[in-house]
Image (spheres, rainbow, N blue to C red):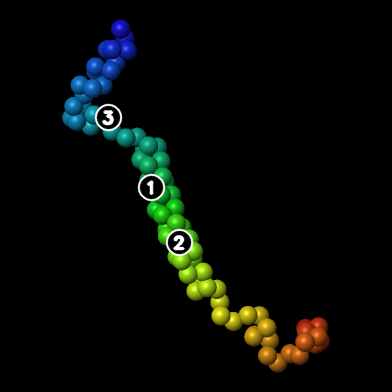
Amino acid sequence: MSSNYCSNTSASMSVSEMSAFPLTLEQKTGFAFVGILCVFLGLLIIRCFKILLDPYSSMPSSTWEDEVEGLDKGTFEYALA
C-alpha cells in the first residue's frame, strides 16, 4: 500500500513543486564536472575519427635522420664531445 502512495505522489508533482528543491553546490559541481568530461570525450572522439579517416596527415613529414645533415653515420659520439 505504501508503494502505491509513493508512486501516486511522485506522478502528481507539478513543475512548480519540483522547482522547490534547488540543487546543492555539490550537485551543481558534479553536473558541471560531468558536462566538462562529456565535452572532452566528444572532442577526443572527433579527433580519433579524424585520425582514422586520414592517418598519414597527423604524422610529421620529416624524420630524425633528416635533421642530422652535418653528421656522418657513426660520428655521433664525437659530436657530443
Mark carried by residue 35: 1
Q: Residue 24: x and y, percent?
A: 34, 35
Q: Is residue 56 left or right of residue 19?
A: right
Query: Is any atom of residue 19 visible in this view?
Result: yes
First of labels 2, 3 by sequence position: 3
Specify the amino acid type for callout 2.
Phe
C-alpha separation, residue under disc 2 versus residue under disc 1 = 21 Å
Q: Quadrant of residue 75?
A: bottom right
User: At which x and y percent is residue 16?
Assistant: 18, 30
Q: Residue at x 59, y 82 (%)?
A: 62
Residue 1 quadrant: top left
Q: Which residue is mark 2?
A: 49
| Residue 44 shown left or right of residue 27 in the figure | right
Residue 35 picture location, percent across and down: 38, 47
- Relative to 59, 46 lies left or right: left
Q: Could you tell which of marks 2 and 1 lies nearer the N-terminus?
A: 1
Crowd class of label 3 (few under 14; some 14 to 19; many from 20; radius 10 Å): few
Marks counted in the figure total 3
Mark closer to the observer (1, 3): 1
- For mark 1, give the secondary structure: helix
Say which mark, if any, is on residue 21. 3
